[in-house]
Amino acid sequence: TPLVKTGDICKQGDILVSGEVPILNDSQEVVRVEYVPADADIYVRHQIAYYQEVPLSYEKKVQSGTSKTSWYFRVGDFVFGADTGKKSRYITSTEEIPWKLTENFVLPFSLGKITRTPYQIEKAVYTKEQAEEKAARQLKLYEKNLLDQYITIVDTSLSITVDKTRCITKGTLTVDEKCGERRSVQKGEETS
């Protein structure tokens, strides 16, 4: 038996659905009351505050020289010929080619290629459009996270402002969220 209607305001701890079932006679009078486990799909609409800042200045990697390639040979877990020295200012990519006798029979040997490209870190500044685009991407990730939690977004009321140092997105998201928990109640508790 529902104890609230769609649109009613409720707070945490309120009983929304009761397992109390009145048994009526032919004259529609209550003869007795049976208690059964209540079952309902309950969705609560509420608002979530959203605030995100994107700094306009950032550091980017810029290629500062020519790429260098080195080769290595792998036997099981052992690697021979790979330059394992510290390469802190390199973008590194690795490609490994396994050796096969047939299509389905792979040997425990492989030949690998390491490509290292040197880079420098430079300071850069997002344009207003780039900052707004990045803020929109972050909002999409946040919305996807909500959807992964089975929270439906009903409405958004957000504003994006850009000043000299940052891009700020703030506002509220109105969402429908499935909630509720089962609990036992004593006679008369649902009316108190």
Image (spheres, rainbow, N blue to C red):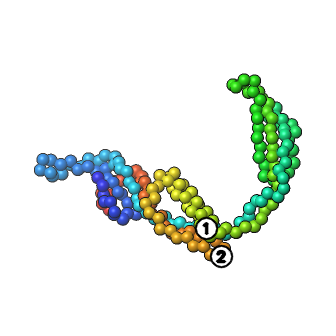
At horizontal 29% and vertical 52% (from top left) the residue drawn is 1
SS for callout 1: helix
At horizontal 12% and vertical 47% (from top left) the residue drawn is 26
x and y percentages locating residue 133 in the rendered image: 59, 63
Q: Which residue is mark 2?
A: 164
**Residue at the far left in the pictured view:** 27
- Residue 129, disc: 1
Residue 31 located left or right of residue 68: left
Q: Check disc 1 and give the amino acid type.
A: Glu
Can you tell which of label 1 and label 2 is closer to the viewer?
Answer: 1
Distance between the alpha carbons at the discs numbered 1 and 2: 13 Å
x and y percentages locating residue 139 in the rendered image: 55, 61
Q: Check disc 2 and give the amino acid type.
A: Lys
Look at the image and tell me in which quarter the C terminus lies: bottom left
Circles 1 and 2: CB atoms closer than 8 Å: no
Residue 29 in view? yes
In this orientation, which residue lies closer to the viewer: 151 or 140? 140
In this orientation, which residue lies closer to the viewer: 34 or 9? 9
In this orientation, which residue lies closer to the viewer: 173 or 9? 173
